[in-house]
Amino acid sequence: MPDDRRPSLFSAALFPAERGWIRDAACAGEDPELFFPLTERESESQVARARAVCRRCRVLLACRRWAVEQGEDAGIRGATTAAQRRAIRRELFDSREGRTTWKTVRARRE
C-alpha cells in the first residue's frame, strides 16, 4: 500500500524541494511544536518524545546530517539536540586533518 503522507508546511519550509527524503520522514505528520520545547520544564519529556519519533524514522541519518551541515541550532533534528549537533560540527571541524568521516562520527554517537 503506498504511503500518501505529504510533508507538512513546517517540513516543507525546513527542507528545500531537492531534499526529497523529507517525504519519508516520520515527523512529516507530527505537530512541529513537539520538536521545539519552549520551557526548561517541558524540555526533558518533550525532547524524549521528539527523539522517539526520530528514532523510528527511516531517514534519521539524512536528517541529522542535513541539520549538522546547515548549522541548525534550534529544535530536535535527526534525534539530536542543538548542543549535540554543535559537538558533531566541532568534531568534524577539529578532525578534518585526521580524516574523520561521517561514518566515524555516526559510529561514535550510536
Image (cartoon, helix red, strand yellow):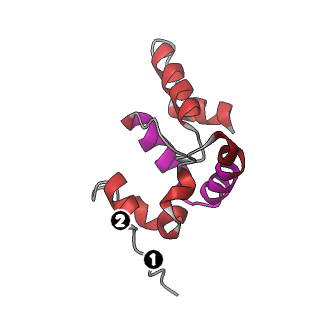
In front of the other: 19 or 70:
70
SS under mark 2: helix
Which residue is located at x 49 percent, y 19 percent?
A: 99
Q: Nearer the viewer, mark 1 or mark 2?
A: 2
Task: Residue 2: tell me if it is visible.
Answer: yes
Kindly identify the amino acid type of the residue bearing the numbered disc 1. Arg
Q: Which residues are magenta?
A: 46-69
Numbered badge on residue 9: 2
- Measured as percent of width and height from the top left, residue 72 is found at 42, 38
Q: Which residue is mark 1?
A: 5
Which residue is located at x 66 percent, y 52 percent?
A: 46
Quarter the C terminus occupies: top right
SS under mark 1: loop
Which residue is located at x 44 percent, y 81 percent?
A: 4
- Measured as percent of width and height from the top left, residue 76 is found at 55, 46
Q: Along the horizontal axis of the image, is 8 left or right of 81?
A: left
Give the distance between the C-alpha atoms of the residues marked 1 and 2, in whole angstroms: 12 Å
- Measured as percent of width and height from the top left, residue 13 is found at 32, 56
Q: Along the horizontal axis of the image, is 83 left or right of 110?
A: left
Q: Is residue 63 magenta?
A: yes
Kindly identify the amino acid type of the residue bearing the numbered disc 2. Leu
- Measured as percent of width and height from the top left, residue 100 is found at 53, 22
Q: Is residue 29 magenta?
A: no
Which residue is located at x 41 percent, y 60 percent?
A: 21
